[in-house]
Image: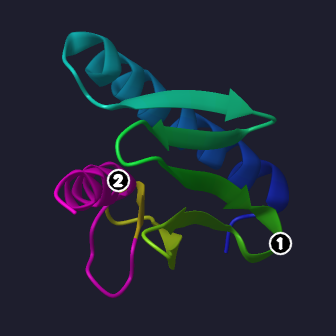
């Protein structure tokens, strides 16, 4: 298990990369969402229908948590893939967020 400082650096880097990718996507097309960061927490705000995803590092348990679609997703660090992944599906942070955005858009 990684120590607290290593987790903080790794999670910050992963969330920063996700934020940059989502902002680029937001600017590219009519994404229907806006990305905000507050104190290391990413918020994805949807216009129609109105909604919000919250993506936050949880340092005590060394996970990244996503609250979306009335569900909590808890991602663990995978040394093999060098990314945070959802254990039950094997989806990386980026892939999972993309899928959740798609599901939200098609509700």
- Say which residue label 1 marks: 60
Q: Position of residue 89 (x, y in %)?
A: 26, 81
Q: Is residue 79 above or below residue 24?
A: below
Nearer-the-camera pick, 7 or 42? 42
User: Which element type, helix, strand or loop, lies under badge 2?
Assistant: helix
Q: Where are the magenta residues, as a range?
A: 86-107
- Say which residue label 2 marks: 97
Q: Earlier in the sequence, mark 2 or mark 1?
A: 1
User: Which element type, helix, strand or loop, lies under badge 1?
Assistant: helix
Label 2 vs label 1, nearer the camera: 2
**Going by the picture, which residue comes out furthest to the bottom?**
88
Q: Position of residue 44 (x, y in %)?
A: 50, 41
Give the left or right position of residue 52, taking residue 87 as reference.
right
Q: Quadrant of the C terminus?
A: bottom left
**Magenta-drawn stretch contains 68:** no
Residue 47, by quadrant, is top left
Q: CA distance from mark 2 to mark 1?
A: 22 Å
Residue displayed at 38% across by 82% down: 87
Nearer-the-camera pick, 55 or 2? 55
Residue displayed at 32% across by 48% down: 94
Give the left or right position of residue 53, taking residue 11 as reference.
left
- Mark 2 surroundings: few (<14), some (14-19) or many (≥20) residues within 10 A: some
Q: Quadrant of the N terminus?
A: bottom right
Residue 64, by quadrant, is bottom right
**Magenta-drawn stretch contains 100:** yes
């Amino acid at each position: 298990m990684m120590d607290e400082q290593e987790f903080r650096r790794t999670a910050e880097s992963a969330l920063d990369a996700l934020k940059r990718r989502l902002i680029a996507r937001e600017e590219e097309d009519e994404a229907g969402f806006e990305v905000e960061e507050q104190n290391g927490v990413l918020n994805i705000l949807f216009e129609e229908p109105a909604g919000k995803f919250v993506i936050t590092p949880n340092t005590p348990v060394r996970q990244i948590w996503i609250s979306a679609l009335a569900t909590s997703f808890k991602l663990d660090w995978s040394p093999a893939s060098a990314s945070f992944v959802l254990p039950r599906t094997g989806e990386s942070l980026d892939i999972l967020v993309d899928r959740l955005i798609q599901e939200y858009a098609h509700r």
